[in-house]
Image (cartoon, grey):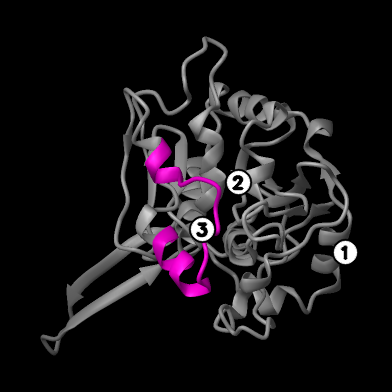
Amino acid sequence: MVLTSLALGGLVAQEKAAPARTGTAKAGHPVTEVQSYVHLHGMPAKGKILMVASSPATSAQTGWPIGFWAAELTHPLHVFQEAGYEVELVSTEGGKLMMDSYSNPTDPSGYSAHDVISLGYMQMPWFNDMLEHTRKLRAVDASDYDAIFLVGGQGPMYTYRGNHDLEALFAAFYESGKPSAAVCHSTTLLLDARTSSGDLIVKGRTWTGFADAEEEYADQAVGQKIQPYRIETEARKLKDTTFKVAAPFSSYAIADGHLITGQQQNSGAAAARLLVNMLAK
């Protein structure tokens, strides 16, 4: 399903975000000004971004039904819409999508009860319709979009790794010089994805993804091993690439060239802003 820009906001004259300016008022106290672009509802879209999410799966480790992490879709989506971009969401197999239960702000666990952005989107009929009807990623053409953003969650550990269609699609964006982003467990794709020359996409690049310390925390929280492998552990086995992580569950994103990565669910908006800034250049 294709989304048009739905951002809120008033008239804004400046197209690009302006850095904060600090000066001194006549009274002698400091004054800081902040201005950034907010797309006015009804204005033409500035471009089109492809978002990819995992189709529903079942965890071989826990037996849980798994899918995408809500905040890793909604927080970047909000950034893209506010910046004036049209977004299309597709999935690995097409059809109806499912949130990881712990990412749903209405889940009885209360784990993501603080996620008011996801909760807000869940009240929108068009958003729920979007989750019900996704095109399969094999049906899309990279030339129709300006950038790609991979949504994470528990599903990608099973539906992204070894998915040659997704590897080829991501490589097509990357080799075209288009912003190519992945966050959290969606970065598992980068353990194997290669360019047409046969090199890993991450060769010579600095990138991030879900940290071992974060996996350990999650395992202890539920009393069992959740994932079949750990991205950081596997990434550090690769040659000619640099994998970095920040403090557990902090917002952390890296742009190296036009490859953009975010550490985990709290990093989706930061990765999305890097992508938007890249498109604005």
Residue of label 2 = 157
Residue 48 seen in this snapshot: no
Three-letter amino acid code at the position of disc 3: Gly
Mark toward the start of the polypeptide (3 vs 2): 2
- What is the magenta segment's predominant secondary structure? helix
Which SS class for mark 3? Answer: helix
Point out the tag, 2 or 1, that comes first from the N-terminus: 1
> Dot 3, how many residues are within 10 Å of its Cα: few (below 14), some (14-19), or many (20+)?
many
* Residue placed under numbered mark 1 in the picture: 129
Front residue of 50/201: it is: 201
Q: CA distance from mark 3 to mark 2?
A: 17 Å
Which quadrant would residue 232 be assigned to in this image?
Answer: top left
Q: Write down the region rendered in magenta.
A: 215-234
Q: Is residue 231 magenta?
A: yes
30 and 260: which is toward the camera: 260
Please identify the residue farthest to the top as the structure is shown: 197
Residue located at (62% from left, 70% from top)? 103
Residue linked to disc 3: 268
Residue 72: x and y in percent read 59, 60
> Counting other residues with Cα less than 10 Å from the Cα at mark 2, is it few (<14), some (14-19), or many (20 or more)?
many
Q: Residue at x 62, y 40 (%)?
A: 148
Question: Earlier along the polypeptide chain: callout 3 or callout 1?
Answer: 1
- Residue 200 magenta-drawn? no
Give how far apart the Cα atoms at labels 2 and 1 are.
25 Å
Q: What is the number of the mark on residue 272?
A: none
Q: Nearer the viewer, residue 238 or 253?
A: 238
Q: Is residue 168 above or below residue 124?
A: above
**In terms of secondary structure, where does tag 1 sit?**
helix
Residue name at image x 80 percent, y 31 percent: 138
Foreground tag (3 vs 2): 2
Residue extending farthest bottom: 27
